[in-house]
Image (cartoon, rainbow, N blue to C red):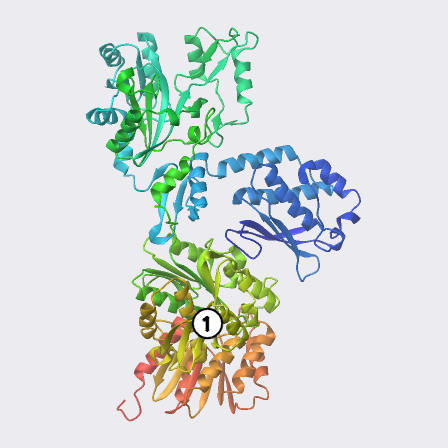
Amino acid sequence: MDVSRTRALRGPNLWSRHMAIEAIVTCPEAERAVSQMAGFEARLRALFPGIGALHPESGGPDISLAHVLQTAALALQAQAGCPVTFARTTATTDAGVYQVVVEYSEEAVGRKAFEYAEHLIHAAQGTGSFDADAVIAELRELDEDERLGPSTGSIVAAAVARNIPYRRLTRGSLVQFGWGSKQRRIQAAEVDSTSAVAESIGQDKDLTKRLLHAAGVPVPLGKPVDTLDEAWEVALKVGLPVVVKPQDGNQGKGVTVNITDRAQLDEAFRTAAEYGTVMVERFLPGHDFRLLVVGDQLVAAARREPPQVLGDGQRTVRELVDIVNQDPRRGEGHATSLTKIRLDDIAVARLTLQGLTPDSVPDKGQRVILRNNANLSTGGTATDVTDDVHPEVAARAIAAAQMVGLHICGVDMVAETVLRPLEEQGGGFVEVNAAPGLRMHLAPSYGKPRNVGQAMVDKLYAHGDDGRIPTVAVTGTNGKTTTARLIAHLFTAQGLRVGMTNTDGVYVNGRQIDSGDCSGPKSARNVLLHPEVDAAVFETARGGILREGLGFDRCQVAVVTNIGAGDHLGLNYITTVEDLAVLKRVIVQNVATTGYGVLNAADPIVAAMAPSCPGKIIFFAADRHHPVMATHRAQGHRTVYVDGDSIVASEGSWRETIHLRDVPITRNGKIGFQVENVMASVAAAWGVGMPWQTIRRGLSGFVNDSDNAPGRFNIMDYRGATVIADYGHNPDAMRALVQAVDALPAKRRSVVISGAGDRRDEDIREQTVILGAAFDDVILYQDAAQRGRADGEVMNLLREGLAGAPRTKHVEEIRGEFIAIDAALERLQPGDLCLVLVDQVEEALAHLAQRCTEAPAPGTAA
């Protein structure tokens, strides 16, 4: 068994909406039927009993090792605690070659599980060893390292529940919610609107106390100190007992409470000094409470208890700690709801104060404290008291957060109870936290869990706002780049800042920020990251979907222009038009339930995608009487069609008409494929709710030149002859171009063409079969990149396509694109027409523009 081309599908993809690892797996003939491999399954189950059932391929009598790999990779993740359920193995057109797809929740874990699944199979075959327990433990640990912690995870879960998209920006807890100009970011439980100044104030405990005191909030007396003597002096001044802690600290590090003599204070001072400047303040008797404030609301409260054990008169402290740590809720870090208690130097010192050691046996019922602070990160526990908080206490907590300037704030309070105002019981606030941990509220040791993540998301986004911007995905064989550009132009006419990706680059608000073929998911994600994007239009190519899936989870509108046989068939196991349709259908399957699929009713393969759309459908076609159009319209649904010299949008009895004479790109409706592109664009704009006045204005201002749509039927004048530059490179594009060119007057017609080497032989030949029937002169050139073909191979295929051409009178072969263009231009006479099928789009258009500028019009001086 050979595993190759493993890749991560990070968005909705050909197989499912799940993130997944996809691999090509080749099995020799002897490994295609596990039942014929003597003793293999028994050895497999002995090595990994949790692998579960090995299901045969649907309708097949047996399974291959590729199927075993799929089952093992999924089971290993599931055993490690990952929430994964989807896996699939599909045979390709090559014998013994399979595509294996396994869902993952964390990419690193998914990849590692795939590797270990392969090791398991080799071990079951007698090569190598496999320790299932050790592997699962490693995967579980890796998952804990990779996945979001409970605090950030709760906020993300609340956002997902509101259909707000999110993206992790780092392996840590920095997360973006929403898209483009609607994006918000959090770091753990901090939001982007909180200033660094407020966070800095919260870290300075002395400044915080002074500000809270100025706001009338009860705080313990105290101050920062530099020396032991000064610390003792302050302790005597504020009155024993005291608390010693770092001025800038968190998670209870370096904190010692209830200090009653000089020796304890000296030791506490040295401990706190390890973390920076030391503070001494009055010790407040009572319980430790955490009050969570979000905006102007108290959303949760918990009473925290320090890590402790209860003696039973038989076991040592060490044994009692081990028993407590067996609680499955306790882990090593912050990934679990509770943290294991540590018997470290601080715990030993606290035991000493109680006259105990780790090996002491406490009396039955004796409460043994192992830390001075009650932080969950050091093994403490929490009891929810949210419903008990007195309104005066809540008001003081909110005032404390607002005085510091924190939008999300954990206020630490010491008091006997939360049932009475602080002044009545001598309690006070001891500090505020800019990035409070949420575990104690999400999963308290005792009491009711609180969905504090929802409160934070509600702070970021108002009710009904999902953080999404209008997003349109466009795919198809031909016309997708022009359609994407036209839709983006319509958004611009609406006054929106548009992010657009296509095969020419990435554009934000009219400025190109990346070049090259940017029709994949990475470019789409970059657009959605950009804070100046109010609407997004994505040309979505087949290659990007295959490599990585979509760059977004949902789109508001998905446009499919057409599906043609010449669209890279034969690559990546996409061998038929039906295969290609299933792949390009992915954008339709991922339309929002409130969105629209815009489908070409005249293309039966495209029209058949309609049932896959979660939203509604807008069909478009030039022929309004087409059965699909007529049926859809009769049912009261939206359609866009041509009626005489106008484009009509129809829904029920309502009609909207756009005259083709007002749409320059169509040349009064003469260029058929541009009319189709306009219909698709109008339907998309309608689907996002754009005003019709804006649509009309946008269409009238879109000119098909090299600036708006480079390489898409750009028309120029050369000495009275018409020159058309286009990037068409498949048979369907050739047919559309021939139809458009036939609608334009010309004395003599010539074409300059090369061929893309990554197409099938029959597709390359068919291009010149089509062109040979429509043009008088043909110039063949070899382009810059042969894409895997031998020198001259593409030219030979093009020449074969011209054999027996009924119209072509002159054929010439030239090496070099610009040389071929110059040769064609030199032969042009006024009234002629020349179609140039460019390869290097930008360079060729610049070359043509320069030649047309230099060439004088007939009858003028040179």
Which residue is depicted at the point 34% across and 24% down?
Answer: 275
Residue 84 image offset from top left, x and y in percent: 57, 43
Query: How many labels sit on residues?
Result: 1
- Toward which corner of the image does residue 121 lie, by quadrant? top right
The answer, for residue 570, to whether it is visible in the render is no
Which residue is depicted at the point 49% across and 39% down?
Answer: 146
- In this rendered view, identify the residue nearer to me: 330 or 119: 330
The answer to whether 48 is drawn above or below residue 476 in the figure is: above
Residue 186 image offset from top left, x and y in percent: 37, 41
- In this rendered view, identify the residue nearer to me: 200 or 277: 200
Q: Helix or strand or loop: what does disc 1 sit on?
A: loop
Left or right of 281: which side holds 187?
A: right
Residue 535 image offset from top left, x and y in percent: 36, 59
- Toward which corner of the image does residue 500 lie, by quadrant? bottom left
Which residue is depicted at the point 62% across and 66% down?
Answer: 575
Residue that lies at the very extreme toward the left in this rendered image: 214
The answer to whether 719 is drawn above or below residue 12 in the figure is: below
Neighbours of disc 1 within 10 Å: few (<14), some (14-19), many (20+): many
Which residue is depicted at the point 54% across and 58% down?
Answer: 546
Amino acid marked by disc 1:
Gly
Quarter of the image with the C terminus in it:
bottom left
The answer, for residue 183, to whether it is visible in the render is yes
Task: Name the residue that disc number 1 marks.
Answer: 479
